[in-house]
């Protein structure tokens, strides 16, 4: 009996030891699964996601428990009981059974000064500071992932990791030396520093760039470059027609915060390399070398085409152009046949032997034809035919060569064309899927696309330079990005070198009133966050996502946040990758962004893609006409913008009982009238015979449910559509 009692006392006395308070250094020595109670100060907030790092006077440790740690803010002093676990080889606390915030607003522990080689594991999960570091990609945006830096005092190389939603995202990587603070961490034994925000970057020098160099006032013979330092400085700019900046070094301001220089005297469509700098005393900060372009003297035509019916009831004066499958196919053939010297093709997939034959015919007529495609795509129209020109397949086993681009006569002033968009050269993409094609007649833009082509081709000749060719993540940001095309400002970016998702986010966040988007795939978190932020800022946000079941899709997040987003179960795939901003307000910089770039991590980081951002009210309105037709479910009605000698007005509109169809015809014709609901289902059909001059037909609508409808008028095989609304 005494032995049993003694054993019970020993067991009871040992239980509290399992949950005894431990300092963090001691807790880190416990085996996984051990329950421990610790107290520490929270060293980070939500910028690092769910995880919170806590420290006491002995060490630091991460706490990962979505039900607990997300409520903690930097400076909170907390006591928690949880289990010792690990993730990616790093020790952490998980499965919290109790948590208390003891106090808030405490000063975090001071950062331990260390070096890239010594920060981990010596200071794992602690706040550290590494002084005198230079980032590798100065001036370029921080994006999700790893960014390299070098400590100048010892040459050691280190890395920071920036996660989705981090406040550093899309801000410029600092020029010049900085002191860098963050949480020491590692993933699978690869050390990485986790900065918490902009406040963890401290400039060392007396001068640094507050604003990166920007181009403006683009003319056919020049442009202006401006940038801004943190204090009054002396500024200069180096320039040349090559990256060697061989043309000289020019003063660009003294005793001012802003540097500025306006160049003149260049030829049209000339690419100029520039590097800006600012000086205070003996300190100097330099930008990276940028390439910019003067404007061309081309026509500047910017013409979108859509391969399905559009809704011109929202037209602001220029009805969007529709080229149904056979018409779009013929357009590509005609443009290929129009080439005078050169054709460069970058197309992901091609099963149209007739388009391949058009290229063969061009080659046989003395045109230089070069073709890049994806290694892993079958491309039956390239595989099942004898091709006399070079076809270069890239990106095998990694990302995708996902462009859909045709460049014609890039060096010509009046016959240089870039034809791009979302359309692959396949039966489905041309005929049944919903796609946009956009053609731009501009020599400068065509030369930029040719630079991108040559980088992937590995040479500027007719044969690819296999050993010099680069694709995907190996490419450089080496093309101009801003163009004055017939008075319209157009931006051009290539993935993955040009940080395109930051540019998409810039477009989204520029909205004042309205955002409409249509994308095949949407898995990039920060673009979802940007749309939700705009929605909560009272912007009217609407959109389509075709592949709502992709891993990591933003569809459910947008829907649960109240964004008006739809999937697309109708026949035909929405293959677009566009967003339209402020199409309803011409005074608010209406923008269209389009191209081949899906809103995905792969498009951002490994695929070859291209993107155009067009600042133009008319082009934005034409894309809006396409979007409204998709939003209203209008499919399968092949329309033309106008029928010669015919006009129609509908009133009252909206209506509850009847609508008058006010018809005018120059010549006597029969008119077939069909009424479709928003899903493209016919709800009424009749014919008006021998109509001439003005004729008003009263059409009853009281039997129709409330909603939008489309009235199609067909004369001699041509169809024009008006939109009506039934109300009660």
Image (cartoon, grey):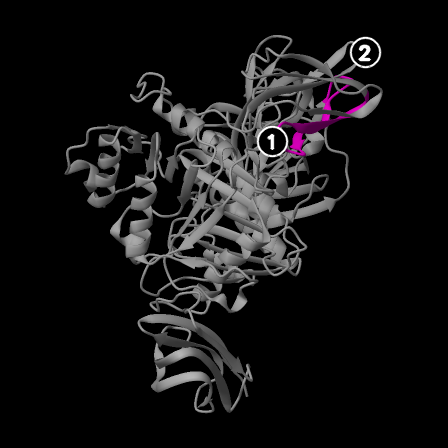
**Residue at position x 68%, y 12% from top?**
249
| Residue farthest along the front direction in this orientation | 667
Q: Do the residues labelled 2 and 1 touch (CB within 8 Å)?
A: no
**Residue at position x 35%, y 75% from top?**
715
Q: Which of 316 and 311 is in front in this view?
A: 316
Judged left or right of residue 586, residue 442 is left
Secondary structure that dominates the magenta span: strand
Judged left or right of residue 433, residue 722 is right
Which residue corresponds to mark 1?
220
Q: Position of residue 63 (x, y in %)?
A: 57, 39
Which badge, 2 or 1, comes first in the chain's sequence? 1
The magenta stretch is 203-232
Q: Position of residue 348 (x, y in %)?
A: 31, 39
The quarter in which the C terminus is drawn is bottom right
Q: Can residue 38 be seen in this view?
A: yes
Q: Where is residue 571 in the image (x, y as percent from the top left)?
A: 31, 64
Judged left or right of residue 384, residue 342 is right
Q: Distance between the residues labelled 2 and 1?
A: 37 Å
**Residue at position x 71%, y 32% from top?**
199
Q: Where is 386 relative to 113, above or below?
A: below
Q: Where is 89 relative to 639, above or below?
A: above
Residue 492 among those drawn in magenta? no
Q: Is residue 59 visible?
A: no
Q: How many marks?
A: 2
Q: Position of residue 503 (x, y in %)?
A: 56, 40
Q: Residues within 10 Å of mark 1 (few under 14, many from 20)?
A: some
Which residue corresponds to mark 2?
281
Q: Where is 149 relative to 73, above or below?
A: above
User: Which quarter of the picture shows residue 141?
Assistant: top right
User: Which quarter of the picture shows residue 108?
Assistant: top right
């Amino acid at each position: 009996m005494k032995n049993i009692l003694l054993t019970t006392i020993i067991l009871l006395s040992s239980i509290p030891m399992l949950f005894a308070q431990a300092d963090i250094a001691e807790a880190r020595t416990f085996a996984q699964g051990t329950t421990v109670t610790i107290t520490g100060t929270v060293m980070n907030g939500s910028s690092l996601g769910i995880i919170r790092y806590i420290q006491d006077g002995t060490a630091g440790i991460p706490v990962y428990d979505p039900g607990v740690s997300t409520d903690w803010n930097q400076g909170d002093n907390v006591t928690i009981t949880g289990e010792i676990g690990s993730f990616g080889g790093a020790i952490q606390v998980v499965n919290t059974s109790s948590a208390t915030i003891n106090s808030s607003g405490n000063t975090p522990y001071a950062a331990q000064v260390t070096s890239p080689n010594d920060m981990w594991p010596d200071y794992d999960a602690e706040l550290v500071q590494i002084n005198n570091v230079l980032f590798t990609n100065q001036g370029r945006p921080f994006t999700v992932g790893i960014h390299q830096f070098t400590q100048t005092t010892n040459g050691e190389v280190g890395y920071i990791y920036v996660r989705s939603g981090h406040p550093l995202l899309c801000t410029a990587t600092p020029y010049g030396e900085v002191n860098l603070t963050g949480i020491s961490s590692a993933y699978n034994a690869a050390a990485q520093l986790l900065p918490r925000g902009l406040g963890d970057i401290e400039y060392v020098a007396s001068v640094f760039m507050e604003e990166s160099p920007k181009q403006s006032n683009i003319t056919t013979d020049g442009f202006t470059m401006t940038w801004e330092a943190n204090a009054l400085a002396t500024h200069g700019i180096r320039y040349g027609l090559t990256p060697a900046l061989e043309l000289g070094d020019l003063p660009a301001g003294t005793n001012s915060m802003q540097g500025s220089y306006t160049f003149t005297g260049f030829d049209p469509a000339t690419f100029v390399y520039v590097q800006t700098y600012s000086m205070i005393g003996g300190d100097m900060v330099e930008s990276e070398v940028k390439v910019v372009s003067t404007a061309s003297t081309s026509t500047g035509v910017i013409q979108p085409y859509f391969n399905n019916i559009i809704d011109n009831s929202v037209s602001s004066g220029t009805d969007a152009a529709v080229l149904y499958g056979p018409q779009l196919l013929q357009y590509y053939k005609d443009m290929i046949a129009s080439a005078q010297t050169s054709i460069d093709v970058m197309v992901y997939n091609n099963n149209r032997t007739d388009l391949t034959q058009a290229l063969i015919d061009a080659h046989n007529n003395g045109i230089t034809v070069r073709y890049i495609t994806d290694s892993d795509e079958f491309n039956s129209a390239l595989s099942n035919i004898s091709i006399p020109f070079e076809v270069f397949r890239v990106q095998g086993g990694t990302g995708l060569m996902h462009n859909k681009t045709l460049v014609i006569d890039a060096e010509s002033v009046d016959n240089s064309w870039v034809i791009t968009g979302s359309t692959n050269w396949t039966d489905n993409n041309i005929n049944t899927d919903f796609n946009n094609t956009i053609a731009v007649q501009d020599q400068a833009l065509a030369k930029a696309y040719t630079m991108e082509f040559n980088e992937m081709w590995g040479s500027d000749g007719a044969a690819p330079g296999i050993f010099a060719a680069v694709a995907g993540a190996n490419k450089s940001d080496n093309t101009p990005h801003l163009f004055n095309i017939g008075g319209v400002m157009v931006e051009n970016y290539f993935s993955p070198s040009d940080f395109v998702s930051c540019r998409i986010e810039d477009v989204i966040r520029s909205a004042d009133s309205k955002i409409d988007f249509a994308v095949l795939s949407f898995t990039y978190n920060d673009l979802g966050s940007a749309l939700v932020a705009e929605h909560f800022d009272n912007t009217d946000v609407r959109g389509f996502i075709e592949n709502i079941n992709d891993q990591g899709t933003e569809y459910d997040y947008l829907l649960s946040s109240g964004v008006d987003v739809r999937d697309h179960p109708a026949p035909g795939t929405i293959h677009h990758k566009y967003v339209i901003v402020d199409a309803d307000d011409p005074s608010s910089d209406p923008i269209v962004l389009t191209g081949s770039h899906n809103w995905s991590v792969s498009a951002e980081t490994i695929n070859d893609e291209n993107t155009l951002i067009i600042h133009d009210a008319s082009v934005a309105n034409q894309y809006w006409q396409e979007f409204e037709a998709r939003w209203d479910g209008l499919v399968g009605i092949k329309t033309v913008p106008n029928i010669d000698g015919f006009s129609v007005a509908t009133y009252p509109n909206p209506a509850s009982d009847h609508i008058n169809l006010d018809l005018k015809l120059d010549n006597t014709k029969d008119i077939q009238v069909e009424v479709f609901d928003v899903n493209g289902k016919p709800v009424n059909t009749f014919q008006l015979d021998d109509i001439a001059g003005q004729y008003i037909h009263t059409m009853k609508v009281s039997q129709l449910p409330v909603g939008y409808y489309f009235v199609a008028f067909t004369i001699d095989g041509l169809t024009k559509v008006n939109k009506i609304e039934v109300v009660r």
